[in-house]
Amino acid sequence: MIRIKCLCLLLFIIILGLPLSAEDTEPSWLNKKILKLENSTDIETPTSNLITNSSVSTINLSDLAEENLTLPYYYWSWSKIEDLTSKIDSIYFEPKAQLRELIVSVLTSEMPANIEIPKEANLYISRLNKLIELGQYKEAQTFINNNDPNLTLSYQQQVELNLLKGNDTLACSQFKIEGTNNNTLKQKVYCLNHEGKQSEAKIVFETAKILNKLEEYDAFIIELLLNSKKFAQSHNIDIKNNLSILDYIILQKNDIKIEGRFIPTSFFFYNFSKTYNIEKKLIISERLAKFGIISNLQLFRIYKESDTINDTALIKRKKCINELEVAISKQSSDDIRQNLVKCLTLFQKIGLSSNFSKYYRTIVLAEVNTGWESPTSVKMRLLSKDYSSLKITLTGNSNFNSAQSIARNNFTKLNGLTAFEKSIVGAFEETKYKAQNTILIDQGKIGEVILSSIILLDSEDPKEIQDGLIGLIQAGLTDVAKDIAIRLLIEG
């Protein structure tokens, strides 16, 4: 009996006084989060609704679209940090427009972000780089401010953000901060040139060439920077496919056309901030808005400007918006409805039907409340995520019917669907849960299921798209899956 008591006492002392393993000697990220929540009197309730908040004043970060879907911290808590990093790195840098809101919400969710821990630092950099690739500069700036205000890891990313905003002075002022020696030779020469120190810039450049410190391509880009536009435009330029942001800006400042090369859409924000010609600005704005980089408010504000343009298609869209605005100001329902039908057709041709529908959502709802039920009113409500009380009967357009069926959760009258439409509808009509997703969810790795679903949804394979939608449904994001599916069907 005494031995048993002694043994119990010894075990009790061991349990109380010793860590079970080396990993327990320091609180995990999840434990720290739980302690933080226990001490917090204000816990936010996660929401699964995608909302776009558009608040614009001038051409700067506030012109950017803001996505706001809150994914709880525990979606990521049980995953290995390196697995999250790997999946985030696998997201395509120019994904389908329909996926952007979800991707940005994932990247800005509360994950481990202690930059002093190598694995968490890698995850932080992966998320930050992806935000910049996507053109989500406002979120990227907030991400840096919250997690790395001293720019320990984010120095180059902060330089890129400042350059893309057209703020060379701020970007170059970073180079003078004590303790920062992360500047590339190209950046040093660029800033010396910006500050009017051309002679010093040329000395640095020539010295680097003599010492073989420059690759041939970089040397050529610097040559363009340090010489006149006439010099730059008189040379044949073999542009790399993987342009850096600084390369792109140098080429733009020399008015060099970059043809036959892929240019990330996010780079065009630099042109947006520098262009004063209304026609050029409108062309750039349409492209940026399509990918959710600038807000709908900013886009349609430009349509309403009075400047003259020459492009025939742009003239039609601009004229339609202005006629719609006149009808709204006169509160003429017949003219409002007529122009909504005409404008939606025009914007659907360039992949901006969702942007148009969201911007004029309240106008459509006001007309519906006075009895307007038409294919246009239904389509605009589907694209602006207002699925309530759809009364119109199904039409002969199979993709439109499929979208309505998903919104209503009623699949009884669907006929003649394409293979693509069947795959999307099938994700909701007969949802067959994936065993691998179930295993991950049971392990608490909900975020990994969401990331895998995003990668599948960016495919062109109907089966993979279906599996991606099912993954979101299994992860509890049914409404998000519906929104994506409806846009994929209507916008094609």
Image (cartoon, rainbow, N blue to C red):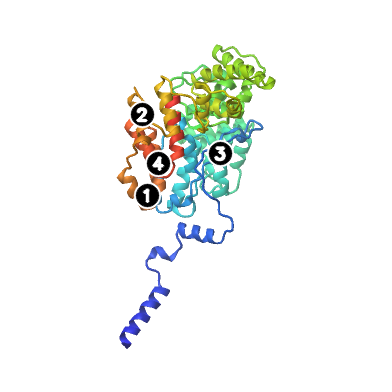
Q: Are marks 3 and 1 in contact (CB under 8 Å)?
A: no
Task: Identify the residue position indicated by label 4 in the image.
Answer: 473
Q: CA distance from mark 3 to mark 1?
A: 39 Å
Q: Earlier in the sequence, mark 3 or mark 1?
A: 3
Task: Identify the residue position indicated by label 3 in the image.
Answer: 159
Query: Which residue is rendered at x = 58% and y = 21% of the image?
Result: 282
Q: Quadrant of residue 427?
A: top left
Nearest the viewer among 259 and 327 is 327
Q: CA distance from mark 3 to mark 2?
A: 35 Å
The residue type indicated by label 4 comes to: Ile
Q: CA distance from mark 4 to mark 2?
A: 20 Å
Q: Residues within 10 Å of mark 1 (few under 14, many from 20)?
A: some
Q: Quadrant of residue 428?
A: top left
Task: Identify the residue position indicated by label 2 in the image.
Answer: 460
Q: Earlier in the sequence, mark 3 or mark 4?
A: 3
Q: CA distance from mark 1 to mark 4?
A: 12 Å
Query: Which residue is rendered at x = 63% and y = 16% of the image?
Result: 323
Q: Nearer the viewer, mark 3 or mark 2?
A: 2
Q: Position of residue 235 (x, y in %)?
A: 49, 18
Task: Identify the residue position indicated by label 1 in the image.
Answer: 441
Q: Earlier in the sequence, mark 4 or mark 2?
A: 2
Q: Are marks 3 and 4 in contact (CB under 8 Å)?
A: no
Quarter of the image for the C terminus: give it.
Answer: top left
- Residue 407 vertical placement versus 36 (above, below): above
